[in-house]
Amino acid sequence: MGHTSLHAELASGDLIESSHLGVYGVVLKPPFIKPARAIMSLRENGGFTVVKRMEVLNDIMATYQW
């Protein structure tokens, strides 16, 4: 099967891993549409490390001067 095939049932809370993606979705994403999701790195022991936490509204609004 190809890289675009999904062969499992998914449920709320499941994690999906993909090793064929860049982080262009974070860099090129307009912040007013949706805050960026967290970026995680898979460790050799099967665990993961949060490389960049998920953005929240305060992250987006912090760059504006009112």
Image (tube, rainbow, N blue to C red):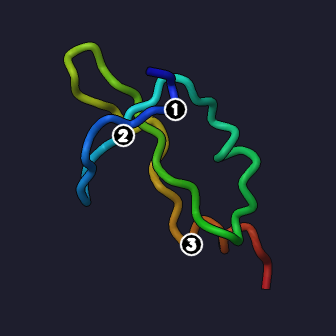
Residue 24 as seen in the image, left or right of residue 34: right
Q: Nearer the viewer, mark 1 or mark 2?
A: 1
* Residue at screen point 65% across, 47% down: 26
The residue under label 1 is which amino acid type?
Answer: Thr
Q: At 79% across and 86% down in the image, what residue appears?
A: 66
Picture coordinates of residue 18, whole percent (x, y): 45, 30
- Image-based side of 34 in relation to 2, left or right: right
Residue 49: quarter of image: top left
Q: CA distance from mark 1 to mark 3?
A: 35 Å
Which residue has dot 3 on it? 58
Which amino acid type is shown beneath numbered disc 3? Asn
Residue with the mark numbered 1? 4
Residue 41 horizontal/vertical position (percent) = 40, 28
- The number of numbered discs placed on residues in the rendered structure image is 3
- Is 31 or 65 nearer to us in this picture? 31
Out of 53 and 65, give the one closest to the viewer.
Answer: 53
Answer whether labels 1 and 3 touch (C-beta < 8 Å): no
Residue 40 sits in quarter = top left
Q: Earlier in the sequence, mark 1 or mark 2?
A: 1
Where disc 1 sits, the SS reads loop
Q: Residue at x 51, y 67 (%)?
A: 56
Q: Neighbour class for label 1 at 10 Å: few (<14), some, many (≥20)?
A: few
Q: Pointer 1 and pointer 2: residues touching (CB < 8 Å)? A: no
The residue under label 2 is 16
Q: Is residue 47 above or below residue 59?
A: above
Mark 2 is surrounded, within 10 Å at the Cα level, by few (under 14), some (14 to 19) or many (20 or more) other residues, namely few
Judge left or right: residue 42 versus residue 58. Answer: left
